[in-house]
Amino acid sequence: MADRQRKGSSGRRPLGFDAVAYKGRNVAERSFALAKQWRGVATRYVKLALTHRSAIVLAACIA
């Protein structure tokens, strides 16, 4: 975003834009956002590390 602001009104894409990498990053970001919204994981009701990890893996499988 800073790159586009620096270019001003031309607003073209940065030269190093990789569409495939961007799509992969978007999938990962949405998965983490979904896991963060899951109440059991977000509020740490699960106290044991193994159970917490299992909940995150389960959320990743569902997403």
Image (cartoon, helix red, strand yellow):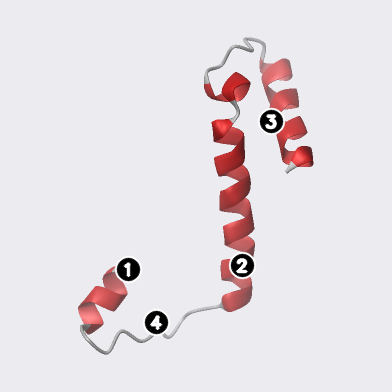
Mark on residue 56? 3
Q: Name the residue under label 4.
A: 14
- Helix, strand or loop at label 1? It is loop
CB within 8 Å, label 1 to label 4: no
Quarter of the image holding residue 35?
A: top right
Q: How far separated are the C-alphas under marks 1 and 4?
A: 10 Å
51 sits to left or right of 43:
right
Quarter of the image holding residue 3?
A: bottom left
Q: Residue at x 77, y 31 (%)?
A: 58
Q: Residue at x 75, y 25 (%)?
A: 54
Q: Which residue is drawn at 22% across and 78% down?
A: 6
Eyeballing the image, is 44 above or below 57?
Answer: above
CB within 8 Å, label 1 to label 3: no
| Disc nearer the start of the sequence (1/3) | 1
Residue 41 appears at what percent x and percent y? 60, 23
Q: Quadrant of the C terminus?
A: top right
| Disc nearer the start of the sequence (4/3) | 4
Q: Mark 1 points at which residue?
A: 1
Q: Mark 2 points at which residue?
A: 23
CB within 8 Å, label 4 to label 2: no
Q: Which amino acid does label 3 sit on?
A: Ile
- Helix, strand or loop at label 4? It is loop
Q: Which residue is drawn at 67% across and 11% down?
A: 48
Q: Which of marks 4 and 2 is in front?
A: 2
| Disc nearer the start of the sequence (3/2) | 2
Q: Which amino acid does label 2 sit on?
A: Lys
